[in-house]
Image (cartoon, rainbow, N blue to C red):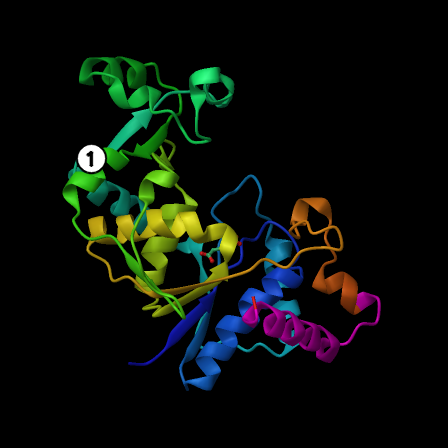
Amino acid sequence: MEVITRFAPSSTGHLHLGHAYSAWLGWQRARISGGNFLLRLEDIDSTRCKPEFNNSILEDLRWLGLDWDGDIRVQSDFLPDYRAALQKLDARGVLYPCFCSRSEITRALAAPHGGEQKYPGTCRHLTLGERKARAAEGGNYAIRLNVELALEAVKDFGFYEEDIGYIDGRPETLGDVVLGRRANKASYHLCVVHDDAAQKVTHVTRGQDLFDATHTHVLLQRLLGLPTPTYAHHPLITDADGRRLAKRDGAATLRGMREAGVSAATVLGQLRVVDRQNATL
Ligand code: GLU
């Protein structure tokens, strides 16, 4: 089987070392096996994504020498496809509209009985009449996956984790995730599942922070009749204080390192060291 890997950064900031690690692992996986390494720009969040970050992502990858195959897939070019996927899920009866505001959800989570940090399912129990009445008010609303119903519709939802083996699916960990919005928007979870299949990706290499999301993604793949790639979740690179690198904290970006005179060879050397350390964990 031909190996197809991908790097799928969000266009919300400049790349840092953690992104470089993900990209490098996927690139290596493809190059070692004579497969293809694809690039996808995840730019559907119009409030946070900026075109200038797309250019900077390409520049950084070129600087590192991580070349990709074929055309770059830009998610904002495929909005009707995500809408169609959402409709397919709706036809399976596993979606529901959620009218909760951000502050209502925060309050529910903060309440003593709020329990786990996931949507408490408030709107799951609305009657059809209540849903229609709320929708008729005309505001925007979220479209959520009803995990309980989805689990009734799907039997096996495990996946293969490279170097570990078969992992049983636990999509209830993230719960009723948002898959879209009334205002014609699709969420990360839906688009990533759609696109990995559209790009025929066989191996997904990404950070451990997305491990729980993978369980949700596999469930969505089963519901949509899409293949499940093999997954590899790598440990996150942390800063000197042991905190994960994050764009919002201004973690050292590749661009910043380059401007400070650090060479691409030094960055790649750092990634190899991290990788060797991770291999001994
Ligand atoms: N776009 C996501 C991010 O930058 C990663 C997508 C993925 O690897 O599935 O966090």
Give the position of the N terminus as an image quadrant.
bottom left
Residue 83 point in image, percent of width and height: 30, 44
Q: Going by the image, does 29 lie left or right of 94?
A: right
Q: Going by the image, does 275 lie left or right of 69?
A: right
Residue at 25%, 17% (x, y): give it: 126
Q: Tell me if residue 216 comes above or below residue 232 in the rendering.
A: above
Q: Tell me if residue 199 comes above or below residue 252 in the rendering.
A: below
Residue at 46%, 85% (x, y): give it: 32
Residue 139 point in image, percent of width and height: 39, 20
* Tag 1 residue: 149
Give the position of the C terminus as an image quadrant.
bottom right
Q: Amino acid at mark 1?
A: Leu
Quarter occupied by residue 3: bottom left
Foreground: 164 or 16? 164
Q: Answer whether residue 275 is magenta in the image.
A: yes
Q: Would the CB of label 1 be found within 8 Å of ligand 1? A: no
Q: Looking at the image, can residue 79 be seen?
A: no
Q: Answer whether residue 92 is magenta in the image.
A: no
Q: Residue furthest right?
A: 260
Residue at 43%, 17% (x, y): give it: 113
Crowd class of label 1 (few under 14; some 14 to 19; many from 20; radius 10 Å)? few
Quarter occupied by residue 147: top left
Residue 135 point in image, percent of width and height: 30, 19
Foreground: 111 or 185? 111
Q: Going by the image, does 52 lie left or right of 179?
A: right
Look at the image and give the residue range highlighted in magenta.
259-280
